[in-house]
Amino acid sequence: MLSRIDVITLFPDWVHGLRELGLTGRAIADGRVELHCWNPREYASGVHKSVDDRPYGGGPGMVMRPEPLAQAIEAARGDDAAVRVGCLTPQGRRLDQAAVRELAGRDRLILVCGRYEGIDERVMESLVDEEWSVGDFVLSGGEPAAAVMIDAVVRLLPGVLGHERSAEQDSFSDGLLDCPHYTRPETWRGRSVPDVLLSGDHARIARWRRARALERTRARRPDLLSGRTPDAGNDAVPAEFSPPKEDKN
Ligand code: 9D3
């Protein structure tokens, strides 16, 4: 079970934000996980303490210099030679909930955040064990991706979510998108809450929610259903809840 996360970043304010805010802030305050931060700039030498330089071969942008970054990674690793070093890069393995569960089951996480056009490849070869992406879009650096990964992982740690919101009930833990939700008033701007939710019949409500979740998943993210076995997985939409067409997106 994860007890410690180390982030290597030129922008430690991202990590301070995780410490101070929200679910991650509370988990750290409660001692459920430690979050440490290492800034390559503190390992840079010379009056300018430069952490980047122009790319060999030319081209736009800058590349993170190997030595300050390597020293920051080694400082984070300490004497724990076994801990895997992950790097957030657009070329990495796409993060999904299965990967998040896997990461939450490790003892430690070391996350290297890139900035500029990238990191000197020799650091990737010699010190980085795995690369992670959070999706096929362009961020300005690895920090927001690390924040996403850390939030997703920390909420799985025991005691982080209140018992009223168990991680097991989540969308994606059963591989489906979430069902719709409603609260008061019963009618809002001419739209009423589905009768079944007011019925008090909890078994029927559970079947309705699953039917809605299945229909939504089929309409919006059929890729999530493609690896499933409809019969064994109980994935048929009950006839009692044959849906209004789900056609958003
Ligand atoms: C526009 C710059 N690109 C050159 C063709 C390469 C590039 C380098 C660095 C693109 C983005 C970044 C910064 N992004 C990350 O470090 C990053 C990221 C992302 O951009 N998308 C999804 N996941 C991740 S994890 C780290």
Image (spheres, helix red, strand yellow):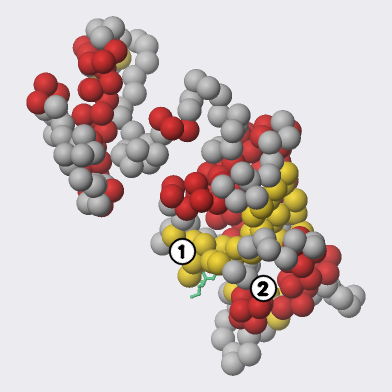
User: Residue 77: x and y, percent?
Assistant: 75, 62
User: Residue 103: x and y, percent?
Assistant: 55, 51
- Residue at the image position 28 percent from the left and 21 percent from the top: 206
The quarter of the rendered structure image containing the N terminus is: top right
Q: Is mark 1 within 8 Å of ligand 1?
A: no
Q: Nearer the viewer, residue 9 or 93?
A: 93
| Helix, strand or loop at mark 2 | helix
- Residue at the image position 43 percent from the left and 32 percent from the top: 168
The quadrant in which residue 63 appears is bottom right
User: Residue 127: x and y, percent?
Assistant: 67, 73
The quarter of the rendered structure image containing the C terminus is: top left
- Residue at the image position 59 percent from the left and 41 percent from the top: 154
Instruction: Name the residue beneath numbered marker 1.
Output: 93
- Residue at the image position 56 percent from the left and 29 percent from the top: 161
The quadrant in which residue 235 appears is top left
Res. 223 in view: yes
User: Residue 172: x and y, percent?
Assistant: 38, 41
Res. 10 in view: no
Which amino acid lies under the numbered mark 1 shown in the image of this protein?
Answer: Arg
Instruction: Name the residue beneath numbered marker 2.
Output: 127
Q: Are marks 2 and 1 in contact (CB under 8 Å)?
A: no
| Helix, strand or loop at mark 1 | strand
Residue 128 lies, with reference to residue 218, above or below; the image says below
Mark 2 vs 1, N-terminal side: 1
Residue 184 lies, with reference to residue 110, above or below; the image says above
* Numbered badge on residue 235: none
Tally the numbered discs: 2
The quadrant in which residue 238 appears is top left
Which amino acid lies under the numbered mark 2 shown in the image of this protein?
Answer: Leu
